[in-house]
Image (tube, rainbow, N blue to C red):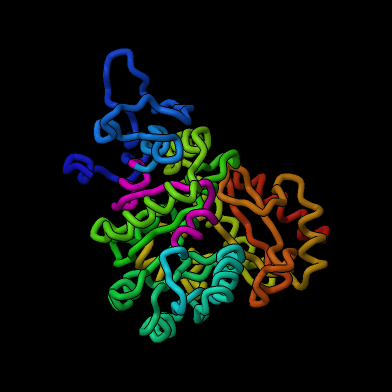
């Protein structure tokens, strides 16, 4: 990042980075470049693109923008899981992996699959228990942290972990729920940051894409990841890259509104007689409040509530009119899901837990829908 950009706030960087050079009559936005084949030269060193699986101007623009926001070198992938798979591909046979007790089930399943084939040792710990994470990390090759976690909204003390996790271990932080606007893990000692850009970065539920950002001092890891992406071909689509880059421009505004809505709804849900527990770090009584207040620039727009049991949770969801029942999140619309409806969901997640992704609708409309659903259920 240039010195001029380093002086700008993240909200500004989200708007201005990843654009073409300003020239008269040139497009202000990076257009989608639909090309699988580029004109070559008999001297390969004279060309940078080579082939559609190697580079594309639209990906590169998005990677510049995400890299500027996180303060590292970004690579985009065809999905968040493709990005996660690329990171895990760095580990050899016999590695030791530290994984959150509660984390995204896709990552958990992928680690288990690889562990069975490659004789990995997998230790699961609560990311909120810093001492337990550090104890497990002493002999680890990779420490995987989600913060806040999916779907239980646990918060990790990233500065403490970054200071103390051995430098021999790769410290990965899945920061999808926080976005770069609420925390920047590379500044706290992380090696790699992971984003499912499908979620908040895109923000409009119309693109599937993943991104990783590597600490600039680890150019060795960046080089390996880039070479593997070229070889295996888990590249992002051109149109998806364009849509995510466009969505990134309004991330600050969307997050500000959604986060404000979440704060209001979380407080009201805590006093509702049918809600057993509300998980949201913006609540003073939440176990992650102090850490989030100290380490994050905001509390995010994800809430998890617990109802009595699975039938009650499903009856509540069925009665909602405005909230959308779907497995994804981070869009402008408010969505929710009972996570244990998936047979592969981790058993540590309560049966009656509902993960709620708060959108940008009027908060009173959202609340009225929730209140009616709870009353009817």
Image position of 313 (left or right of 207): right
Q: Nearer the viewer, residue 83 or 345?
A: 83
Where are the magenta residues, as a range? 64-87
Residue 175 occupies which quadrant of the picture? bottom left
Q: Residue 128 at what x, y percent from top left? A: 46, 76
Numbered label tally: 0
Image position of 365 (left or right of 86): right
Q: Residue furthest left?
A: 3
Image position of 92 (left or right of 103): left
Report the residue at 37% width, 84% height from top.
139
Q: Is residue 68 magenta?
A: yes
Picture layout, residue 181 above or below residue 347: above
Report the residue at 78% width, 69% height from top.
310
Q: Residue furthest front?
A: 42
Q: Is residue 208 visible?
A: yes
Q: Is residue 125 visible?
A: no
Residue 145 occupies which quadrant of the picture? bottom left
Magenta span: chief secondary structure: helix
Q: Is residue 91 magenta?
A: no
Q: Residue furthest top?
A: 25
């Amino acid at each position: 990042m240039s010195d001029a950009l380093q002086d700008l706030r993240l909200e500004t960087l989200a708007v201005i980075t990843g654009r073409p050079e300003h020239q008269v009559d040139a497009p202000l936005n990076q257009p989608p470049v639909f090309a699988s084949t580029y004109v070559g030269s008999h001297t390969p060193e004279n060309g940078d693109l080579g082939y559609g699986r190697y580079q594309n101007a639209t990906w590169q623009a998005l990677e510049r923008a995400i890299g500027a926001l996180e303060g590292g070198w970004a690579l985009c992938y065809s999905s968040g899981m493709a990005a996660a798979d690329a990171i895990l591909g760095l580990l050899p046979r016999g590695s030791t992996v530290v994984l959150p007790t509660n984390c995204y089930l896709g990552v958990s399943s992928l680690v288990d699959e690889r562990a069975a084939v490659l004789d990995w040792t997998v230790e699961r710990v609560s990311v909120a228990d810093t001492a337990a994470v550090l104890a497990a990390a002493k002999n680890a090759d990779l420490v995987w942290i989600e913060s806040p976690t999916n779907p239980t909204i646990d918060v990790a003390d990233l500065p403490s972990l970054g200071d103390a996790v051995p430098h021999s271990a790769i410290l990965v932080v899945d920061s999808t729920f926080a976005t770069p606007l609420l925390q920047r893990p590379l500044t706290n000692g992380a090696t790699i940051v992971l984003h499912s850009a499908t979620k908040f970065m895109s923000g409009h539920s119309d693109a599937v894409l993943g991104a990783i950002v590597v600490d600039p001092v680890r150019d060795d890891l960046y080089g390996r990841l880039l070479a593997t992406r070229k070889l295996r071909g888990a590249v992002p689509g051109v149109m998806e890259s364009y849509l995510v880059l466009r969505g990134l421009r309004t991330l600050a505004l969307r997050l500000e509104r959604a986060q404000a809505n979440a704060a209001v709804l979380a407080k009201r849900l805590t006093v509702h007689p049918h809600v057993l527990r509300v998980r949201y770090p913006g609540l003073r009584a939440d176990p992650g409040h102090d850490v989030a207040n100290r380490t994050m620039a905001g509390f995010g727009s994800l809430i998890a509530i617990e109802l009595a049991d699975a039938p009650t949770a499903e009856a509540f969801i069925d009665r909602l009119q405005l909230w959308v029942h779907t497995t994804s999140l981070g869009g402008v619309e408010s969505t929710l899901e009972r996570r244990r409806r998936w047979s592969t969901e981790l058993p540590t997640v309560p049966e009656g837990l509902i993960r709620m992704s708060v959108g940008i609708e009027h908060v009173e409309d959202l609340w009225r829908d929730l209140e009616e659903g709870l009353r009817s259920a």
